Amino acid sequence: MISPIIKEYLGSIIRAAMTFLAGYLVTSGVVSESEATTIAGSLTLVLTTLAWSFYEKYRKRGKLQVALGTMKIMTEAELEEDIRRGRRAKVSTPKTALPQVSRTTSKDTSPPAA
């Protein structure tokens, strides 16, 4: 899960970039001020949607890699608990390789809740 502060930072960066781009287009005479506002709003929405989509695909790929690398039968809820407790696998693992699963920040070694 992305930290809420990171989401806010990304949103601020996207908004600042769109504001800068809109201002540049207006001062260059490419578009009017009202057109720039419309363009900036639309681009912000598109970029935010793309960023969220990429993150969701990354998160789902990570979940799949942990499930494949764990080598045990478990429910989706148990898998999510395992991931919450720090179990990770590289999302870049090729389809022809078995993912290497490791624990990261959590020291909790108790089995996931049922």
Image (cartoon, rainbow, N blue to C red):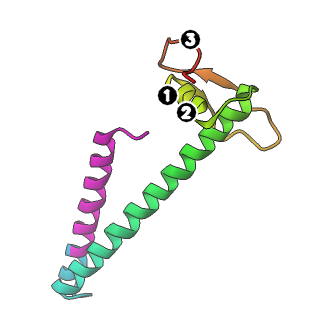
- The kind of residue on which mark 2 rests is Glu
- The kind of residue on which mark 1 rests is Arg
Q: Would you name the residue on which mark 3 appears? A: 109
Residue 57 horizontal/vertical position (percent): 56, 52
Residue at 28% across, 47% down: 9
Secondary structure mainly formed by the magenta segment = helix
Residue at 78% across, 44% down: 95
Q: Is residue 5 magenta?
A: yes
In the image, the segment drawn in magenta is 1-22
Judging depth in this view, the residue of 73 and 14 nearest the camera is 73
Disc assigned to residue 80: 2
Task: Pick whichever of labels 3 and 2 is earlier in the sequence.
Answer: 2
In the rendered image, the residue lying farthest to the front is 114
Disc assigned to residue 84: 1
In three-dimensional space, the C-alpha distance between marks 1 and 2, rounded to whole angstroms, equals 6 Å
Task: Pick whichever of labels 1 and 3 is earlier in the sequence.
Answer: 1
